């Protein structure tokens, strides 16, 4: 859930993409390939890499705090590329820039596969663009969407409040559940 507290006069829209529609758009051979693929996801994703130089300067302090808290402990998890939505039963693509590689696939082939599947997700017909007004609230289902803010608002202020609710562990079409790789689940359990 996201609330626009301070929104720029222009820019700063959010795009949402429907990953269930993207899966349905895949040609049958790509669906079959996707059904069998698993990917290694990691929390060490550099959000600032996609920002302009001007925005990188503005984000420098925030990025330092982000890195010291969010990525100070690397987490790696294997997820199925095709997730079965626990409520609707729809098949959705579980993809995004947290993917390091596809399991059993070379890094170069992983990048090409990622680009192929991601292109289906971000097709205009699978997306919606929201122009924020102060106090707007958006609620979406992360199990079947991707989202991103468009960093086209220069130095204008954009302050959002976000709440994320817990969810279920992703399950592939064969019933296999996502699995934690790093830190090792036993080590994490002992720490808690």
Image (spheres, rainbow, N blue to C red):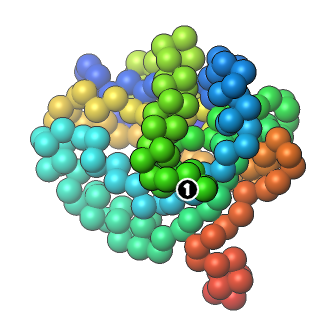
108 sits to left or right of 40: left
Q: Residue at x 35, y 71 (%)?
A: 68
The location of residue 58, given as percent across then percent down, is 17, 48
Q: What element carries label 1?
A: strand
Q: In which quarter of the image is the C terminus?
A: bottom right
**Is 58 located above or below residue 119 in the figure?**
below
**Residue at 82% of width from left, 54% of height from top?**
176
| Name of the residue lying farthest toward the bottom | 190
Q: What x and y, as percent, mark residue 41?
A: 55, 56
The mark tally for this picture is 1
Residue at x 35%, y 49% (from the top left corner): 47
Is residue 21 at least partly visible in the picture? no
Is any atom of residue 90 visible in this view?
Answer: yes
Q: Callout 1: few (<14), some (14-19), or many (20+) C-alpha neighbours within 10 Å?
A: many
Q: Nearer the viewer, residue 7 or 27?
A: 27
The quadrant the N terminus occupies is: top right
Taking the image as shown, residue 154 lies to the left or right of residue 73, namely: left
Q: Residue at x 46, y 20 (%)?
A: 130
Among the 4 quarters of the image, the one containing residue 181: bottom right
Q: In this view, does 123 lie to the left or right of 80?
A: left
User: Where on the picture, by quarter, is residue 188?
Assistant: bottom right
Q: In x, y percent, where is residue 111?
A: 44, 43
Check disc 1 and report the residue beneath it. 41
Is 179 located above or below residue 170 in the figure?
below
Q: Which of 55 and 31 is in front in this view?
A: 31
Of 108 and 80, nearer the camera is 108
Horizontal side, residue 105 vs residue 80: left or right:
left
Provide residue 151's location: percent of width, then percent of height. 28, 32
């Amino acid at each position: 859930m996201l609330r626009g507290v301070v929104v720029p006069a222009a820019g700063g829209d959010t795009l949402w993409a429907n990953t269930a529609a993207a899966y349905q758009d895949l040609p049958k051979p790509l669906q079959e390939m996707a059904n069998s693929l698993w990917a290694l996801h990691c929390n060490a994703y550099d959000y600032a890499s996609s920002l302009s130089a001007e925005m990188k300067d503005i984000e420098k302090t925030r990025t330092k705090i982000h890195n010291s808290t969010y990525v100070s402990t690397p987490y790696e998890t294997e997820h199925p590329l095709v997730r079965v939505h626990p409520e609707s039963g729809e098949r959705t693509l579980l993809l995004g820039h947290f993917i390091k590689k596809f399991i059993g696939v070379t890094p170069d082939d992983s990048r090409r596969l990622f680009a192929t599947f991601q292109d289906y997700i971000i097709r205009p017909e699978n997306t919606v663009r929201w122009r924020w007004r102060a106090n707007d609230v958006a609620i979406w289902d992360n199990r079947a969407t991707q989202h991103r803010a468009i960093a086209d608002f220069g130095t204008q202020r954009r302050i959002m409040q976000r709440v994320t609710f817990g969810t279920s562990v992703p399950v592939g079409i064969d019933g296999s559940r996502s699995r934690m790789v790093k830190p090792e689940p036993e080590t994490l359990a002992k720490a808690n």
